[in-house]
DNA sequence: AAGTAATATTGCAATATTACGATGGGATGA
DNA sequence: TCATCCCATCGTAATATTGCAATATTACTT
């Protein structure tokens, strides 16, 4: 066992769980806040900022990227990570919809 | 390693990650939707509804309970699980605040 | 071309999560 | 009393996640 039985669930439930998973680690929350905040798009200060090793940050960035939240471009020799705002707002919309449709009618 | 280094992160980041974790499994999303929807508070139809075994559902319920989202009371011989609406709205507020303060200023 | 800086990938160890069978305990009803 | 139902917990196996050292890759600089 150990693996999630996705076949049992609706695509909506799976989607919510998947985007929640991105936010389900404080380092990823920190990274998202940081790349959103940085005006100058300064890059692997993320490692300094968050305090985890470079491979670990890179791994978390991959999770964020797979979720579609990461944009980036080169600025001189540095690579600049940026939040994909459109996708981020999509996240917000999905959560909002979940919260608004999940209203208690009992007790 | 394998354990999250919580000492590196702010309490806000940890809180967001913790409540996201509750939603980070489709079965728990399904359970939340179900207990919110059910007017009669009927209980371990959750097992039938979601399709996982009773111990597994019980385990997921514990995660939901630890997050403060579960209320319950007896109704005849059955125990009735209910969503703690106040706490659920707190979740929503925390997410909303996160999304609203995490706005990109670069790229 | 060689050196350096920035990032990704690999491999691995530690830990967490998911799932279920077996078991236990409390309440209901025969 | 005793079987039964409902739910929690324990024990355990399978899998996923987290974290880092070592290494590879890529691009810029000298």
Image (tube, coloured by chain):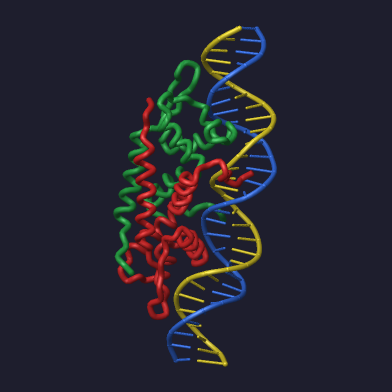
Chain colours: A red, B green, C yellow, D blue
Tell me: residue B96, above or below residue D5.
below
Decide which of D14, C4 is in the foreground and name it. D14
Tell me: residue A84, above or below residue A90.
below
Percent x, y for residue A88? 37, 57
Q: Residue at the spot x=30%, y=53% of the render? A: B100
Percent x, y for residue B22? 46, 43
Q: Residue at the spot x=51%, y=31% of the render? A: B46
Q: Residue furthest front?
A: A11
Q: Residue at the spot x=41%, y=70% of the render? A: A72
- The reply to whether residue A45 is in sight is no
Q: Residue at the spot x=49%, y=46% of the render? A: A11
Decide which of A14, C22 is in the foreground and name it. A14
- The reply to whether residue A91 is in sight is yes
Percent x, y for residue C30? 61, 7
Position of the C terminus of chain A, as image quadrant, is: top left
Decide which of A81, A26 is in the foreground and name it. A81
């Amino acid at each position: 066992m150990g693996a999630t039985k996705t076949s049992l669930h609706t695509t909506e439930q799976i989607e919510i769980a998947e985007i929640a998973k991105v936010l389900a680690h404080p380092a990823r929350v920190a990274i998202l806040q940081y790349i959103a905040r940085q005006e100058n798009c300064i890059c692997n200060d993320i490692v300094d900022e968050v305090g985890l090793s470079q491979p670990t940050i890179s791994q978390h960035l991959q999770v964020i990227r797979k979720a579609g939240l990461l944009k980036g471009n080169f600025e001189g020799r540095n690579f600049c990570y940026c939040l994909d705002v459109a996708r981020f707002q999509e996240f917000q919309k999905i959560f909002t919809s979940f919260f608004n449709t999940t209203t208690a009618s009992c007790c």
